[in-house]
Image (cartoon, rainbow, N blue to C red):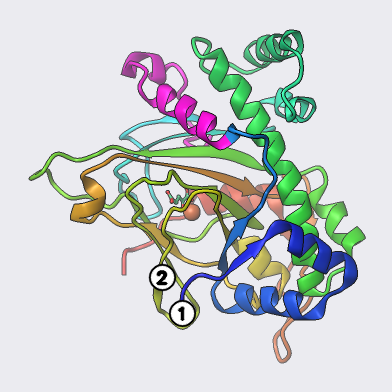
Amino acid sequence: MGVPGFALPDLVEAARDGRSTMLGELDRTCREQGVFRLTDLALPAGLPPELLERTRALFALPLAVKRELRDPDDQYVGWRGADNRNEYGQSDDKEMFHIGPRVSATLAAGAGLVDGDGGRRESELVEAALADCSLWPADLPGFVLVWHRFYAAMQHAAAQLGLALAAAMGVESARWAAMAHDNWADLAANHYPAQPAGAEVRMRNAVHSDLTLFTILLQDPPGPGGLVMRDRSGAWHDVVPAPGEFVVNIGELLTFLTGDDWWAVPHEVRPTEATLARDRLSIPFFFRPHDALVLEPFRVSPGTTAPGPIDVGAWVHARKRMQRVPS
Ligand SMILES: O=C(O)CCC(=O)C(=O)O
Ligand SMILES: [Fe+2]
């Protein structure tokens, strides 16, 4: 069984018309696999390739410049290098960059630029972003701009996808929208450097599930891949990068909201001989509600008691600090 695929416009239409076959298929996928491929996002032409290129330029900056973008206390904002720590207290073989409205208020302003608006507004936006948040790389205005544009495009896709997922869950669209509207989604990048032959082999991204409602991930075709996801039955599936495709994986908050029905899919990026020979880039959009929200489950599985409400900010904070023992 591979990873199922859905076209976003089909999901939007299914949600609007209540088309039960496709919504049923989406529900089954989210219960059993917790991951699907998503196509036809109608992004502005050339946006993903430009995003990948400008993100490579960020990681190519001198180490001293990247260190300026480092937050000593929170590895999930700004740049983090070899001192990143996974849930097992070890460092993954990657560097990363994270940003979101909790630290950068201008991200929401990118919405007006999705269709490539006039140059003056673009340069004003970049200036405003740099003045507002010191985590943006001041030497790379093109990076700042394309990240704002892509962030806005992901918000648009997530709003559409969220309504389809709500329909598949049997949750009213108004209830979903009230939770998702003022979200604090983060956009991030992982850069996994190529390893010289004979170097010590380390995990590129240790097994975890995401602290999100869902994540929309862009890979870097024809990059080397290595991403694998474990379905509810325990089987691992390769999630191979392909042009025009995104990967959507269910996060832990949707497992909570569905009373454990939907599968917060564990996933990892494996180091294999073939994948290690080349560097790899991935860009996850972590779709998460605003920290100020308190969530109650949409439903409770028969025979179980409802878990207590989740204070999103406190939950995320605690979960980021949680340490696990490798199994
Ligand atoms: O690099 C990838 O493909 C996956 C990244 C990931 O799982 C994450 O950043 O949470
Ligand atoms: Fe992940």
Q: Residues within 10 Å of mark 1 (few under 14, many from 20)?
A: few
Return the residue at label 2. 237
- Could you tell me which residue is drawn at 69 percent across and 76 percent down? 27
The range drawn in magenta is: 48-77
Q: In this orientation, does residue 309 appear? A: no
Q: Whole-percent x and y of residue 316?
A: 61, 50
Mark 1, ligand 1, within 8 Å: the answer is no
14 part of magenta stretch: no
| Nearest to viewer (mark 1 / mark 2) | 1
- Give me the residue at 26% from left, 41% from top: 278
Toward the viewer: 164 or 206? 164
> Magenta stretch containing residue 53, yes or no?
yes
The x, y position of residue 70, in whole percent, is: 45, 24
Q: Residue at x 78, y 53 (%)?
A: 160
Q: Earlier in the sequence, mark 1 or mark 2?
A: 1
Q: Nearer the viewer, residue 327 or 213?
A: 213
> Distance from label 1 to label 2 (Cα)?
8 Å
Question: Residue furthest toward the right?
Answer: 174
Q: Look at mark 1 in the image and give the residue it sits on.
A: 1
Position of residue 145 relative to residue 259, above or below, is above
Q: Please name the amino acid that badge 1 sits on.
A: Met
Q: Residue at x 62, y 40 (%)?
A: 186
Q: Quadrant of residue 117?
A: top right
Which quadrant does the C terminus fall into? bottom left
Q: Amino acid at mark 2?
A: His
Q: Given the current orientation, which residue lies at the most extreme front position?
A: 45
Residue 40 % position (x, y): 66, 52
User: Left or right: 175 with respect to 313?
Assistant: right
